[in-house]
Structures are given as structure tokens and as C-alpha cells.
Image (tube, rainbow, N blue to C red):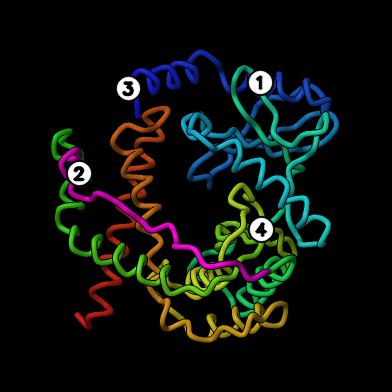
């Protein structure tokens, strides 16, 4: 990233107080004056969330990461996600959609971008205590999404992951970053994971559908047993086989290194009740479980300065550490050590 551009974005955040921005936002959108204080909400790994009260109700406001919003093509991605969000609303998928104000979902104040949501009560399931029923429900929701408009497509070469691990290691060492030793010690694992991911992508059949590859356990709220899917900015068109496998693994415990085959069966039982493309050769595309390398690269970039402030840099460092250490443990377990 251009250092001058990064400095300008960092200055943009500092020049505006978030409370003032949100107060202006709520007035602009006609939902009333903010009743202070504004409460930060934990959980967002890319953007920042706030709980807002006005006389008209309680809202959640998402402040979109200025660094991300400055990237080439990002607005086209958000536009596509918003259109797909409308498809999910029409299909009665249980989602928490962004409010449409003045004919648009994304709102702009002071050069910053926001989404406003009605506040959704509920809780996120503890990753260590996900039930079989929750896996079944999550799988069924994903199947319903994939069933909206799946179609076969003509073959084209897949977009492969191309991460220069050696360059990141060099930069981390140069900056004396605390992630440097983690990357050095696990370079072979990172290269292997990326290679297996690319092999799996090449093996996928030519099919596409509406999908939500970000629908892991942290992105479903449960309110008295009823599910509500949140964080829909990653809605896109994608391969249903890839996304079904990745999410089944996450819901069945791969993230916590505690895989439960019954949870995976429950997820696919729910999924297949809603959508079945007749694909069964999942063992041949298991390398899709390594998509975490791309999340890791994003956080390496944040930890090395591609971020809006020190808090985001520290989040990047934390995610690098968590991801690498978790995957290193899983690798040792798979080798029987």
C-alpha cells in the first residue's frame, strides 16, 4: 500500500470523532437524535460495530473499515452483496438486513461509510458448545441460500492463491515484528496449505450459486432458538461445493481443533434437505479447508501496517498468532504427534 495514502486514511479517521459521525448519520437518516453514550459492540474482525439508542428505537451501526473502503473494486463488491441481500430477504431467509434509507443501504457521512440495522437481540453460540441441532439449522439455511439460483457455468481456470510467504517473512524480520518468528517456524506449513488449497480449487466442478461463505458460527445470532444471519457483506456468487465444505468443517469444530463427525453429518443433513447438487466426492476437494491462508495474509498485512490505527494493527497481530498457532496444532494432530 502507498504509504502516503495510508497516512491520509489514518488522518481521516483521527480528524473525526466516531460519536460525532454516528450522531450526524442518525439525523441524516431520519431515525432521531442519538441518546448517548454510544456503545462499542465486540466481535467485528474487519469493521467496527456500535449499539445506538434514539427515541425511535435501538439500532446497530457498522462503521466500514476506511482502509478496506479505499481499495480498488470494493464498492462494486458491496453493491453486489446488497443486491444479493435483497434476494435473501425475498426468499424469507432469516437475516438481519441493512436498513434502506433514501433508496440505499450504504450511508456516507464525513467521507466514512456505514450500515444501519435494527438491533437484533440474541447471542452467538460458544464455539466450544455448538449443538447438533444448531449445525443442522445452519446447514439448512446455507442450502436454502444455494437453492435460490444455482446454475452450471462454462469452464474457466479458477483464481488461485498466490501468496509470497518469503516476502512477508522478510518484511516482518525487517520491521522486527512479533509475528516474524511465527512465520519463519511455519513457512513449510503455510506453503503446503496454499498448494493444497489451489489443487482443490482446480478440482471443483463448474457450478455457481448465490452464497454466503462467511456464515460461520460467529455470524448467526440465536434468539430463543431462532437463527438470524448477520454480517452479510461477503454475500456473493460462488461455488456451493466449496462453501458447503468449508462451513460444515467450521460448524463441526475444525476451528477449535475438536472435530465432531456427528456435527458434520447434522450440517449436511440440514443442507441436503434444502439443496442437493448430487456432488459427493468431497474427499477430493478437502484442500478447501485451507482457505484460512487468505485470511492469514490479510492479517499479516494489517500487522505490518496496512491498517487505520494501532488497535487494528494489534488485532491483525492477534489474528496472525491465533490462526498460525491453531493450524500448527491441527497439523501436529493430523500427523499423530
Discs 1, 4 touching: Cβ within 8 Å = no
Could you tell me how far apart the alpha carbons at marks 4 and 2 are, in whole angstroms? 39 Å
Quadrant of the drawing holding the C terminus:
bottom left
Percent position (x, y) of residue 113? 62, 29
Which type of secondary structure does the marked residue at label 1 adopt?
A: strand
Q: Residue at x 81, y 62 (%)?
A: 91
Q: Which mark is residue 3?
A: 3
Q: Identify which residue, 75 or 101, lies in the foreground.
A: 75
User: Which residue is denoted by mark 1 in the rendering?
Assistant: 109
- Residue that numbered label 4 is attached to: 221
Q: Tell me if residue 248 can be seen.
A: no
> Marks 2/1: CA distance?
37 Å
Quadrant hosting residue 60:
top right
The residues bearing labels 2 and 3 have C-alpha atoms spaced at a distance of 18 Å
N-term-proximal mark, 1 vs 4? 1
Using the image, determine if residue 121 lies above or below residue 148: above
Q: Percent x, y for residue 100?
A: 80, 37
**Which residue is nearer to you in this view: 174 or 287?**
287
169 horizontally vs 216: left or right: left
Give the residue at mark 2: 167
Q: Secondary structure at mark 2?
A: helix
Amino acid at each position: 500500500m502507498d504509504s502516503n495514502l495510508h497516512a491520509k486514511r489514518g488522518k481521516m479517521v483521527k480528524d473525526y470523532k466516531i460519536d460525532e459521525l454516528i450522531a450526524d448519520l442518525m439525523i441524516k437518516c431520519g431515525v432521531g437524535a442519538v441518546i448517548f453514550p454510544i456503545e462499542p459492540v465486540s466481535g467485528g474482525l474487519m469493521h467496527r460495530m456500535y449499539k445506538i439508542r434514539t427515541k425511535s428505537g435501538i439500532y446497530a451501526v457498522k462503521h466500514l473499515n476506511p482502509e478496506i473502503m479505499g481499495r480498488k473494486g470494493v464498492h462494486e463488491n458491496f453493491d453486489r452483496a446488497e443486491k444479493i441481500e435483497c434476494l435473501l430477504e425475498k426468499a424469507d431467509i432469516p437475516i438481519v438486513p441493512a436498513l434502506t434509507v433514501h433508496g440505499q443501504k450504504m450511508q456516507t457521512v464525513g467521507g466514512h461509510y456505514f450500515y444501519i440495522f435494527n438491533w437484533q437481540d440474541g447471542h452467538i453460540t460458544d464455539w466450544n458448545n455448538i449443538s447438533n441441532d444448531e449445525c443442522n439449522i445452519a446447514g439448512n439455511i446455507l442450502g436454502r441460500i444455494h437453492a435460490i439460483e444455482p446454475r452450471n457455468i462454462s469452464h474457466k481456470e479458477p483464481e488461485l492463491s498466490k501468496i509470497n510467504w518469503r516476502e512477508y517473512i522478510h518484511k516482518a524480520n525487517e520491521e522486527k515484528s512479533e509475528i516474524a518468528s511465527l512465520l519463519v517456524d511455519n513457512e513449510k506449513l503455510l506453503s503446503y496449505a496454499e498448494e493444497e488449497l489451489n489443487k482443490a480449487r482446480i478440482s471443483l466442478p463448474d457450478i455457481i450459486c448465490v452464497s454466503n461463505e462467511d456464515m460461520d458460527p460467529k455470524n448467526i445470532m440465536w434468539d430463543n432458538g431462532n437463527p438470524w444471519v448477520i454480517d452479510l457483506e461477503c454475500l456473493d456468487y460462488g461455488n456451493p461445493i466449496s462453501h458447503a465444505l468449508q462451513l460444515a468443517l467450521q460448524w463441526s469444530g475444525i476451528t477449535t481443533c475438536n472435530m465432531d463427525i456427528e456435527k458434520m453429518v447434522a450440517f449436511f443433513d440440514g443442507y441436503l434437505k434444502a439443496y442437493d447438487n448430487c456432488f459427493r466426492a468431497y474427499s477430493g476437494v478437502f484442500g478447501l479447508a485451507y482457505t484460512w491462508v487468505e485470511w492469514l495474509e490479510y492479517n499479516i498485512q494489517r500487522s505490518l501496517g496496512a491498517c487505520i490505527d494501532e488497535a487494528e494493527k494489534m488485532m491483525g497481530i492477534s489474528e496472525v498468532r491465533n490462526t498460525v498457532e491453531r493450524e500448527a496444532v491441527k497439523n501436529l494432530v493430523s500427523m499423530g504427534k
